[in-house]
Image (spheres, rainbow, N blue to C red):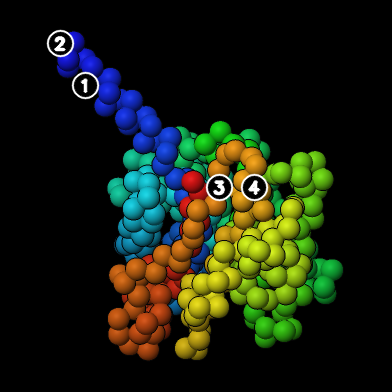
Amino acid sequence: MKRISFILLLLIFSASVSAQNAKAIIGFYNLENLFDTKDDPKKNDDDFTPKGSYAYTTAILKMKLQNIADVVSQMGVQDNSDGPAILGVAEVENRYVLEELVKQRKIRDRKYKIVHFESPDNRGIDVALLYQAKYFRVLSAKALTVNLGELGDTRPTRDILFVSGRLRGELIHVFVNHWPSRRGGESASAPKRNKGAAVCKKVIDSLIADDADVKYVVMGDMNDDPTNESVSKILGAEGKLKKLKPGGMYNPFMKLYKNGIGSNAWQDSWSLFDQIIVSESFFNKGKGGLKFSHNEVFNRSFLIQQSGRYKGYPKRSFSWGVWNDGYSDHFPTMVYLK
């Protein structure tokens, strides 16, 4: 009995050490029009109803939810079987679709919780944060308004989700973004994305003023690449570690982008709009806590369209208005913390 008890204690201790050494994974995924099937008169969501142009039925919504859960269930499991501790998402209509997503069979055991606010976007699409309470404890959350009226645009855009919490016991701040699209042209619409970046940067500067070693993560679909002004200049996200200064931020996706790796494609050209940017404090060797390890675009073969006009692109949900049994027109992205 003593020998059996000793072995059981050893196994419990080993499991505990393994859990302590496991990496924390932070992910982001644009879910491409995850709508419910109901027509909301306050939103421009008519296309995503049973009688709409996409014939968006309950059966299709069910398949889309299953497909997305399939992707999330595979993200990062080679480093941590629980997958992302924190997962920022974009293009979700409301809390209902998020609740249905986290109940899907392939991820329900992770017991993802939800942080979500309704944004003023005309189409009704929002950003949100999914998190596993075993890794992350939310302390506060708020929506940051991106006021485009100052630029003469009366159409509201998505809010930025700002969440503070403790990841494996350590205080971090998370910004989930979905900046304005390039509608009207990249250059003409750039000031709108610069505005989104400026909203983030203002809050970040205030955090740094209170604590020079503060840890924060800026993630999202920026609708800009790492080299664009909004990311590289307004945010000031540096793509080279040797140029990283105290209080600055590092964009690990700059290197991937310059090596031709993208997260979304348009007119046979790849972009890397889906980025996760981390503060310099994740590299501070003189301090303890979580450190940056590596990053990736989760572009597995099953997520890639194998035929047709969009061959080689991310396998989207719909193609030419017809259900494509796909996932999203964006690949997920992740950073790994050790």
Real-space CA distance between mark 2 and mark 3, rounded to the nearest whole angstrom: 42 Å
Circle 1 sits on which residue?
7
Location of residue 131 with respect to 30 vertically, above or below? above
Q: Position of residue 61 (x, y in %)?
A: 37, 61
Real-space CA distance between mark 3 and mark 4, rounded to the nearest whole angstrom: 8 Å
Tags 1 and 2 in contact by the CB under 8 Å rule? no
Q: From where the camera sits, is residue 308 visible?
A: yes
Q: In which quarter of the image is residue 158?
A: bottom right
Circle 2 sits on which residue?
1
Mark 3 element type: loop
Please rate how many residues cluster around mark 2, counting C-alpha atoms within 10 Å: few if below 14, some from 14 to 19, many from 20. Answer: few
Real-space CA distance between mark 2 and mark 4, rounded to the nearest whole angstrom: 48 Å
Choose the circle earlier in sequence order: 3 or 1.
1
Q: From where the camera sits, is residue 31 visible?
A: no
Real-space CA distance between mark 1 and mark 4, rounded to the nearest whole angstrom: 39 Å
Choose the circle earlier in sequence order: 1 or 2.
2
| Residue at 57% from the left image edge and 60% from the top image edge | 276
Q: Which amino acid does label 4 sit on?
A: Asn
| Residue at 33% from the left image edge and 25% from the top image edge | 13
| Residue at 57% from the left image edge and 64% from the top image edge | 252
Pick whichever, 197 or 294, lies toward us. Answer: 294
Circle 3 sits on which residue?
291
Circle 4 sits on which residue?
284
Tags 3 and 4 in contact by the CB under 8 Å rule? no
Real-space CA distance between mark 1 and mark 2, rounded to the nearest whole angstrom: 10 Å
Q: Is residue 28 left or right of residue 81?
A: right
